[in-house]
Image (cartoon, rainbow, N blue to C red):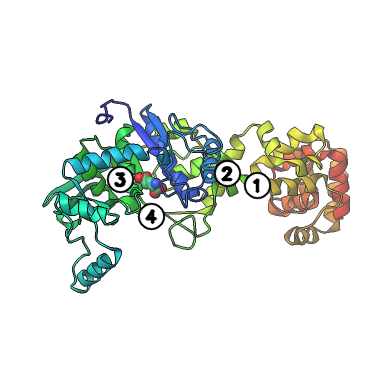
Amino acid sequence: MPAASSSTNTVVTRFAPSPTGFVHLGNIRTALFNVLLSGKHGGDFLLRIEDTDQERSKDEFTAALMVDMRWLGLDWAQGPTDDDGKPGEYHQSQRLGLYQEYYDKLEAVGSAYPCFCSAERLAVLRKTQLSAGQPPRYDGICANLSKEEVAKKIAEGQKPTLRFRVPKSEEVTFPDLVRGEQRFNSDDIGDFIIRRGDGTPAFFFTNAVDDGLMNVTHVLRGDDHLTNTPRQLMILNALGIRHPEYGHISLIIGNDGAPLSKRNGSMGIREMRDQGYFPEAVVNYLARLGHYYADNSFMTVEELSAQFDASHLGKAPAHFDMTQLQHWQKEALNAADDDTVWQWLGESVYKHVPADKKALFLKAVKPNISNSEQGVEWATVFFGDELLIEDDAKTAIDEAGSEFYEIATTVFAEEADFKAAIKTIGKQAGKKGKALFWPIRAALTGKVHGPEMSDLALLLGVDEIVARCKRAR
Ligand code: GLU
């Protein structure tokens, strides 16, 4: 049996998903925080697949998760390597023999015992306790069976569960990295099941044992696991295995006010990739969703790591905010080089934009889009056969009147310098500010908002500018 975890000074964090569905923003944020924490200390981040629920776990979910994490740049120093998601040494389903050794060890030291109580008996017990106003707790009927009694029941074909024997009147305390000191009284926790009647392990048992055996030093996870922690600490304590420090983070609240989950239609990472989100945008957004950064600049994973601090994790639920995500998407776009943005825009843009206009197009459009459809929209504005005039642009054109465009057409044709031309038009037409810019913008793009005027002028070129002003007239 491997000895208790060796003590090293390296920070080791982990992400331990159960592959029962496609990973969504909520799960991946947990992974990210663990990546950032280990990154901050130059430690290791480990990926462990908790697939002990044989029925619900699927290799395809593990494979998809690995793709999603790599896409986001959240790589693991230890963990599965096979891209097909097939079980390997970092899958719990491959470690069942090992867990059995620890069950045996607990039984040997009297910290676990077989329990033969039927589900029916336990249901009645629970009901009775609840109606008497008591918290439901196992009453310990099987806690002191003799060896002979146990052997007899097993010989009769009964299939016991294995229960952990909770020490009496002990205070279990731990300093939560997010929530501060936590206290639990062991008497409030009844002896609990660590192995089911069918031999399958309870998740919090294998989870705790593996954290210990894999030398995990810090666990950041959802606060839905907070009540598991005293149980896990007692198990590790009984086994003499070093336990990690835990921090319980608040869940994300979805747009509908309910926690994000695999079931409530929250956005999957795959979906976000398909929608054209940049991985850096997702990472910058998620890092700040429930974690305070004083620095609001767009950062790499390394930079986010350096400024990560578990004490900056919020205790209150974090609200998912689409506008924030869009903000980081724009930041990511602006930070990306032209080739990356061009690739990201795709075929539907290439077919409109002439090759020699690529750089000018990107310069004009990059600050004005957050998805590739918007790129296509601008490509058609500049290079499409027909210019679609939006309602407020039409109003601006009408208000400016034909005389304005008469002037604009002449001036643009004569004055090569766009800025100077605008100035002259303003003077001649007696207009400035919005009354000057909107009608020009409207004539050139069919919209009253969009790229910098000087950028779009370069992109269109004099002939097209003149032609569009004529058309507006
Ligand atoms: N497999 C567990 C889950 O996905 C892990 C919980 C933990 O991080 O400890 O909820």
Q: Is residue 10 left or right of residue 305?
A: left
Q: Which residue is mark 3?
A: 205
Q: Are marks 4 and 1 in contact (CB under 8 Å)?
A: no
Q: Amino acid type of disc 1? A: Asn
Q: Nearer the viewer, residue 73 or 278?
A: 73
Percent coordinates x, y for residue 340 in the rendering = 66, 33
Q: Which mark is residue 317?
A: 4
Q: Are marks 1 and 2 in contact (CB under 8 Å)?
A: yes
Q: Residues within 10 Å of mark 4 (few under 14, many from 20)?
A: some
Q: Please name the residue that numbered disc 1 is placed on.
A: 371
Q: Secondary structure at mark 1?
A: loop
On the rendered structure, is 185 left or right of 462? left
Q: Amino acid at mark 4?
A: Pro
- Residue 313 can be seen in this image: no
Q: How many discs appear?
A: 4
User: Mark 1 or mark 2, which has the lower sequence index?
Assistant: 2
Q: Position of residue 439 (x, y in %)?
A: 76, 53
- Callout 2, which amino acid? Gln
Eye-nearest disc, 2 or 4: 4
Q: Secondary structure at mark 4?
A: loop
Residue at screen point 76% across, 48% down: 426
Sequence-wise first label, 2 or 4: 4
Q: Earlier in the sequence, mark 2 or mark 3?
A: 3
User: With 71 as the anchor, is 358 left or right in this view?
Assistant: right
Hey, what amino acid is under mark 3? Phe
Residue tagged 2? 329
Give the label on residue 432, or none: none
